[in-house]
Image (tube, grey):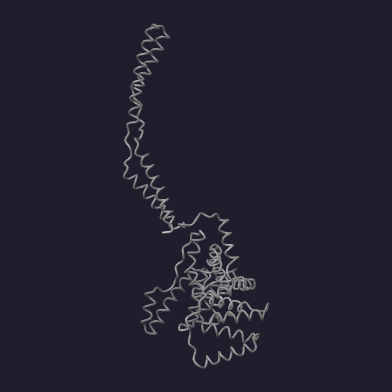
Amino acid sequence: MEDLGFWVIAGGTALVLLAVFLRALGRPVAVAPAENPDIAVYRDQLAEVERDLARGTLAADEAQRLRTEVARRLLEADRKAGRAATAGRSLPLAPVALTVAAVMAGGVAVYQYLGAPGYPDLPLAERLAAAEEVYRTRPGQDAAEAQTPDPDPAGLPQPDADFAALMEKLRSAMQANPDDPRGLELLARNEANLGNYKAAAKAQRHLLDVLGETALPAQRLDAVQYMVAATAGYVSPEAEAQLVAVLQAEPRNHLARYFSGLMFMQVGRPDRTFELWEPLLREGPPDAPWISPIRAGIEEAAMRAGVNYTLPELKGPDAAAVAAAGEMSDADRQAMIEGMVAGLEERLMAEGGSEAEWLQLLNALGVLNQPDRTAAVLKAAEAAFDGQPEVQARLRAAAGASAGAAP
């Protein structure tokens, strides 16, 4: 009910405007008639009187009398023509009212889709300033972790006795030697495997402190993933600092770009999110871990950024095909997969396609262990992206050893 005041004002204004329109449309409509032929006759008679007076065939007093009589008849004819011009009928109100109501209803629908009921109109400068304030004052990693409830132990992976004993030894060893890089990395990875993301984030952050500038982008990304998991999806300033370092070393890093877009979404900059996520979605590959969350959130980012965007269809087998595959024998399932791969291969080799589609095909051929076909597809794909070495490198990486190419 918090938007009730807005809708009362908007609805009242719409009703007042509707009443004004209907009142105006209900008035008689002036109809311009064809010129009265009597008026033309009387004008000719006045002109004839003047000609007779000039020729001397008509006396002055008689000419004055005729002028007066003809002028009287002319005025009467003109009055009759005026009454006919205002005697039109008004427009039918029912169709007009329905049309106006439909236009207003359409306006409400468009506003519901594009607008933000209940929010004040904010100039762009104010929106950017508000987003900057959120960005500047957002909580740090430690504060965010403190506000995030610990997971239910019943929902965490339950290690066997041997693994639990090894973890206790590893934890004890790290207490004795807390700056051991190899031990910190093992501790962080195994804590994450157990669902202890806060402990994993703590260990990995300490590893980065120990390594300093020598930390690898992959190690920084591991820290980001642990920190985001520890805060239930929040990208803290500390996580952002690691993302910046990764992107400085690897500007095209997919995972860093995804988390950067997530961070911008959280601070009120959906325009930056869309700029980062839309190319990622096009680049693929379709089975990359960031594709699914991007598809789930990019339309909202586009809408909030004022971008007219339609999410592309996810190509692949539909739900019915997947369900049918589950009931097939191994041989039938293999045949179905071969058929789908063959169809995609035939289309791409004949018509070309996006980078994501080529990557999808190369990955599928690798799973099917078809090195000869993979090599042919890779050659065609590289030719399709001639002059784009970054794309070609990703294609070769997807082909891998199946195509006899180094990744």
The residue under the point 67% across, 78% down is 212
Snapshot quadrant of residue 222: bottom right
Q: What is the x, y in percent for residue 265?
A: 53, 66
Q: What is the x, y in percent for residue 356?
A: 51, 71
Q: Quadrant of the C terminus?
A: bottom right
- In this rendering, the answer to whether 397 lies above or below 121 is below
Q: Is residue 375 left or right of residue 214?
A: left
Q: Quadrant of the N terminus?
A: bottom left
- In this rendering, the answer to whether 240 lies above or below 117 is below
Q: Nearer the viewer, residue 188 or 346?
A: 188
Q: What is the x, y in percent for residue 13?
A: 41, 47
Q: What is the x, y in percent for residue 126?
A: 57, 56
The residue under the point 36% across, 20% down is 75
Q: Is residue 131 left or right of residue 12?
A: right
Q: Nearer the viewer, residue 5 or 101?
A: 5
- Report the label total: 0
- In this rendering, the answer to whether 253 lies above or below 67 is below
The residue under the point 37% across, 84% down is 329
Snapshot quadrant of residue 230: bottom right
Q: Nearer the viewer, residue 235 or 350?
A: 235
